[in-house]
Image (cartoon, rainbow, N blue to C red):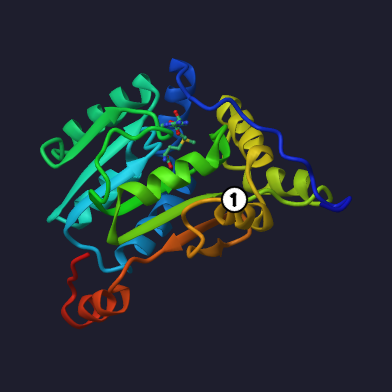
Amino acid sequence: MNWLTLPRKPEPEVMGDAEEVEAYASAAAQAYLDALDNTLVEQVLSLGCTSGWLLDIGTGPGAIPLKIARRLANLRVVGIDCSANMVRAARRAAVEQGLAERVLFFVADANHLCFRDAAFDLVLSNSLLHHLQNPVAVLNEMARVAKPTGVLLLRDLRRPSRLTFRVHVGWYGRHYSGLMKKLYVDSVRASYTGEELGELLRHSALTDARIFFHQRTHLGFIREGQGAGLRREQASATGAGRC
Ligand SMILES: C[S@@+](CC[C@H](N)C(=O)[O-])C[C@H]1O[C@@H](n2cnc3c(N)ncnc32)[C@H](O)[C@@H]1O
């Protein structure tokens, strides 16, 4: 760490407060977050996993897994969150969108997932990492529940330097107001740098994951399972694919 590095300031792990859930769920409907979510959905679609089981960890109001389920009719989807209020909001959205048969939401803790080993073809997580008290435990759980052929994809906010923090949250946070604005600024301050994410991965079961950056605001990692090349070739040749 050098003087340019702004120290991380962790956030509370759970977003359980009804007011927070409402602020988050309604912000998720706004154009900026919606467009951001769409970039992750497109990244998922490009992986060629069109059937099997997807697990979304820290699913919140479920916007991303529901978008993916709408695009991939043969995919079955499970979303978990440790906030009962978030899970209620996600279930309501699944019913409203006619997807409740294929998209299930449960209350569960990412630190101790209630699924057997190698159960999922795709394990996804968005905007969860910066909330976690023990991120390595959660990365290990992601690795445990993914099939050897499965894909893991995590994306989160990225913490800027001490010099650029104020301008960064002012500019990228201009889309938010009220409680959501505060949640955004706190989340950026709690998020990781690329170097720190690399360090977490080195201490986890995901040493083979590849870090990526998305615009100036996000980072993440991807670990494509065995057969990734073939899966992508099939997906681009036929417009389909299977994990
Ligand atoms: C910022 S929200 C992101 C929601 C969603 N993934 C999205 O992108 O819209 C983070 C979510 O992670 C949940 N969460 C935090 N710690 C968790 C844990 N240990 N297990 C499960 N969910 C957790 C919070 O309750 C919250 O709903």
Where residue 176 sits: x, y (%)? 57, 36
| Tally of numbered tags | 1
Q: Quadrant of residue 188?
A: top right
- Would you say 205 lies left or right of 97 here? right
**Type of amino acid at the residue the image marks with label 1:** Leu
- SS for callout 1: helix
Q: Quadrant of residue 238?
A: bottom left
Q: Can residue 126 be seen at all in this image of the molecule?
A: no
Where residue 190 sits: x, y (%)? 65, 38
- Would you say 94 lies left or right of 112 here? left
Q: Residue at x 25, y 32 (%)?
A: 105
Where residue 5 sits: x, y (%)? 80, 50
Q: Which residue is mark 1?
A: 200
From this viewpoint, which residue is outermost toward the top?
A: 18
Q: Quadrant of residue 16?
A: top left
* Quarter of the picture holding the C terminus: bottom left
Q: Residues within 10 Å of mark 1 (few under 14, many from 20)?
A: some
Q: Residue at x 48, y 25 (%)?
A: 15
Question: In the rendered image of this protein, does residue 214 appear above or below residue 63?
Answer: below
Q: Residue at x 17, y 55 (%)?
A: 52
Where residue 228 sits: x, y (%)? 31, 73
Q: Residue at x 61, y 53 (%)?
A: 197
Q: Can residue 33 be seen at all in this image of the molecule?
A: yes
From this viewpoint, which residue is outermost toward the right?
A: 3
- Would you say 23 lies left or right of 198 here? left
Quadrant of the rendered image holding ligand 1: top left
